[in-house]
């Protein structure tokens, strides 16, 4: 069993014990010890995995942390996680990755959860690359509990809002799951690919170099998807290809057709894609293979035809393959490029 320890006050990893740079650790940071403590500069040091923590900044690194300084202990014990009787998104998402593997093992499990972009960006480049790269998370998605009505207005829509999540890795033989839907996902920890897994420090990242055994252990702790199905679409209805759904947004006190402030960021050209055979039939293709989700106000509807299109009541139409300049849009269309999401509203012509 792995013991979880809390760092009582911030210190730096031991100089010379890691090949990378050092990073201050703030008081209250949790670490997972990996072996016996050893003498080192200015005290006793322990090898540990430092998990990512939204409150304390970057993590997910293997490093040396101080166990003592000036004769005083710097680490205090914390309660070890109790394994749940049943593995669900509610019970295993709050666990640290080492505890997920310890509790669930390699037995495949099926969980129902809402999906979104990864909750954590990879510090390292991983081989095989479908585990995620520092420059591109690939097809990794986050899975999280969005509550008893997961697609209702006010439900958590992303991993950070949910507070606990699992970043699920999608291998090449599995179609990428959609984001922003309620899914039933089957997968397992300790995937066979983990045996040849490696995490490589990107140039200039200032991270400690990772031992091959640590990389293998990290990959064993990842949830790898083998199958998924969509239960609820973006409008909260069961999936029915005869009644396709759009991602929607609601802005309080703003009526359709009225202008609203856009705090979006610059984006490359946006290519509209529409395929009514898919459970999430409308998406935005970006250069390099990345995608964004188009989110529409309630006035837009999918119109079947050749080609199918998304149309607003003012006559504005979007068709498959159409390329939009995110800074200009088109007449009658309000467009706000926000990265993962691009919002569309109908505007006066």
Image: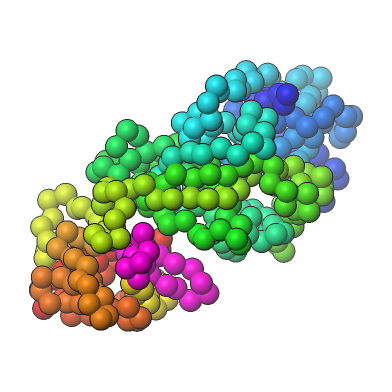
Q: Is residue 215 visible?
A: no
Q: Is residue 188 visible?
A: yes
Residue 80, horizontal then vertical, whole percent: 64, 20
Tell me the quarter of the picture where residue 256 sits. Answer: bottom left
Tell me the quarter of the picture where residue 57 sits. Answer: top right
Quadrant of the frame with the N terminus: top right
Q: Which colour scheme is used?
A: rainbow
Foreground residue among 337 and 171: 171
Which residue is rendered at x = 14% and y = 63% of the image? 299
**158 horizontally vs 254: left or right:** right
Which residue is rendered at x = 22% and y = 72% of the image? 304
Q: In this view, does 202 lie above or below 14?
A: below
Q: Is residue 132 magenta?
A: no
Residue 323, horizontal then vertical, whole percent: 34, 81
**47 horizontally vs 325: left or right:** right
Q: Count numbered badges in the picture.
A: 0
Q: Is residue 49 above or below residue 301?
A: above
Which residue is rendered at x = 78% and y = 49% of the image? 195
Residue 140, horizontal then vertical, whole percent: 54, 55
Magenta span of residues: 275-295
Q: Is residue 182 above or below residue 39?
A: below
Foreground residue among 53 and 156: 156
Foreground residue among 10 and 119: 119
Quadrant of the frame with the C terminus: bottom left
Residue 146, horizontal then vertical, whole percent: 37, 38
**279 horizontally vs 123: left or right:** left
Which residue is rendered at x = 84% and y = 27% of the image? 36
**131 horizontally vs 166: left or right:** right
């Amino acid at each position: 069993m792995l013991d979880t320890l809390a760092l009582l006050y911030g210190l730096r990893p031991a100089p010379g014990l890691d090949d990378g740079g050092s990073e201050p650790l703030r008081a209250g940071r949790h670490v997972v010890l990996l072996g016996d403590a050893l003498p080192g500069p200015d005290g006793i040091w322990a090898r540990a995995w430092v998990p990512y923590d939204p409150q304390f900044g970057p993590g997910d690194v293997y490093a040396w942390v101080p166990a003592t300084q000036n004769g005083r202990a710097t680490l205090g014990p914390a309660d070890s996680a109790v394994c749940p009787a049943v593995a669900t998104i509610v019970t295993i998402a709050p666990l640290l990755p080492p505890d997920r593997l310890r509790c669930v093992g390699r037995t495949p499990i099926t969980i129902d959860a809402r999906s979104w972009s990864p909750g954590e960006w990879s510090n390292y480049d991983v081989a095989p690359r479908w585990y995620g790269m520092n420059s591109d998370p690939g097809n990794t998605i986050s899975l999280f509990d969005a509550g008893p009505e997961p697609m209702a207005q006010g439900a958590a829509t992303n991993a950070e809002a949910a507070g606990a999540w699992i970043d699920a890795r999608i291998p090449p033989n599995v179609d990428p799951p959609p984001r922003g839907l309620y899914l039933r996902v089957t997968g397992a920890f300790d995937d066979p690919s983990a045996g040849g897994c490696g995490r490589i420090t990107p140039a200039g990242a200032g991270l400690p170099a990772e031992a091959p055994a640590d990389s293998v252990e990290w990959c064993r702790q990842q949830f790898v998807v083998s199958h998924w199905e969509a239960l609820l679409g973006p409008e909260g209805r069961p999936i029915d290809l005869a009644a396709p759904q759009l991602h929607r947004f609601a802005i309080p006190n703003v009526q359709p057709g009225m202008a609203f402030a856009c705090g979006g960021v610059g984006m490359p050209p946006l290519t509209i894609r529409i395929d009514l055979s898919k459970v999430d039939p409308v998406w935005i293709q970006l250069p390099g293979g990345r995608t964004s989700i188009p989110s529409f106000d309630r006035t837009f509807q999918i119109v079947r035809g050749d080609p199918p299109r998304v149309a607003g009541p003012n006559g504005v139409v979007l068709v498959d393959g159409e390329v939009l300049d995110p800074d200009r849009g088109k007449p009658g269309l309000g467009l706000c490029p926000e990265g993962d999401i691009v919002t569309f509203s109908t505007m006066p012509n």
